[in-house]
C-alpha cells in the first residue's frame, strides 16, 4: 500500500461540530476522519488525520510528511491567512498538496480572501462543508495515480 495521505487541520478545528455550526456544520473531526478513510480505502489508499492549534506542530507534521506521506490535504484554519512558515514547509514537500476549507472563505470577511497556502496548493476546495475533505481525497487519488 502506498504511503498514507496526511490530512492536517489547524486551529479550532478540534471544535468542529460544536463551534459555529451555522458556518461549519455539526459533523465532528472524527466524522471527517471516518468519511475520508472510507473514501481513501475505496482507492487503495489510507489517511492519517492530524489537528493542532499550534503553528509549529503543523510545520513539524509537514516535515514528517516528507518521509511518511504520499500527499497532504490541509485545512490550515486561520493560519491560511497569516502563515508564511506553513507555506515554506509545504514548499519543501515534494508530493501533491490540496487546500480544503469548510466554509466559502470568499463570502466571508475580506481578510479571509487571501491564502498563503494557495501559493503551493495543487488545488483548493472551499465552501462544500466537510464533504470538501472527501472531495480532496478523491482528487488526491487521481493525482497519485497520475504520478
Image (cartoon, helix red, strand yellow):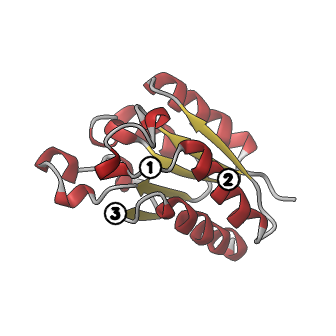
Q: Nearest the camera: 85 or 72? A: 72
Q: Label 2 vs label 1: CA separation?
A: 15 Å
Image point 17% across, 53% down: which residue?
108
Closer to the eye: label 2 or 1: 1
Tell me if I can see residue 101 in this picture. yes
Q: Return the residue nearer the eye: 127 or 28.
A: 28
Residue closest to the eye, 53 or 16: 16
Which secondary structure, mark 1?
Answer: loop
- Considering the image in quadrants, where does the C terminus appear? bottom right
Q: Nearer the viewer, mark 3 or mark 2?
A: 2
Q: Seen in the image, is 102 located left or right of residue 29? A: left
Look at the numbered discs 3 and 2 and tell me whether their residues touch, using CB distance below 8 Å: no
In the picture, the quarter occupied by the N terminus is bottom right
Asked if the residue at tag 1 contacts the one at tag 2, i.e. Cβ–Cβ closer than 8 Å, the answer is no
State the mark number for residue 34: 2
Instruction: Please state if 66 lies on the left or on the right of 53 as rendered.
Output: right
Compared to residue 19, the image places residue 1 above or below, namely below
The image's mark for residue 26 is 1
- Which is nearer the N-term, disc 3 or disc 2? 2
Q: Earlier in the sequence, mark 2 or mark 1?
A: 1
Q: Earlier in the sequence, mark 3 or mark 1?
A: 1
Do residues under tags 3 and 1 come within 8 Å of each other at their CB atoms?
no
Considering every residue shown, the one lying at the far right of the view is: 1
Please indicate whether residue 118 sits to the left or right of residue 63 in the image: left
Q: Taking 62 as reference, is 5 above or below it?
A: below
- Alpha-carbon neighbours of circle 2 within 10 Å: few (<14), some, or many (≥20)? some
- Spatial CA span between label 3 and label 2: 20 Å
Q: How many marks?
A: 3
* Above-or-below relation of 19 to 130: above
The residue lying at 39 percent from left, 55 percent from top is: 102
- Identify which residue is drawn at 44% across, 49% down: 26
Q: Which mark is residue 127?
A: 3
Amino acid at each position: 500500500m502506498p504511503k498514507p495521505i496526511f490530512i492536517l487541520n489547524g486551529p479550532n478545528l478540534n471544535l468542529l461540530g460544536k463551534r459555529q455550526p451555522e458556518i461549519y456544520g455539526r459533523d465532528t473531526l472524527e466524522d471527517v476522519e471516518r468519511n475520508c478513510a472510507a473514501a481513501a480505502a475505496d482507492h487503495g489508499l489510507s489517511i492519517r488525520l492530524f489537528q493542532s492549534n499550534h503553528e509549529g506542530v503543523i510545520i513539524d507534521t509537514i516535515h514528517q510528511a516528507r518521509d511518511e506521506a504520499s500527499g497532504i490535504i490541509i485545512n490550515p484554519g486561520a493560519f491560511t491567512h497569516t502563515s508564511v512558515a506553513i507555506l515554506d514547509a509545504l514548499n519543501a514537500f515534494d508530493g501533491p498538496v490540496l487546500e480544503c476549507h469548510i466554509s466559502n472563505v470568499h463570502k466571508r470577511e475580506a481578510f479571509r480572501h487571501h491564502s498563503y497556502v494557495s501559493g503551493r496548493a495543487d488545488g483548493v476546495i472551499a465552501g462544500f462543508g466537510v464533504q470538501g475533505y472527501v472531495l480532496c481525497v478523491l482528487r488526491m487519488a487521481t493525482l497519485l495515480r497520475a504520478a
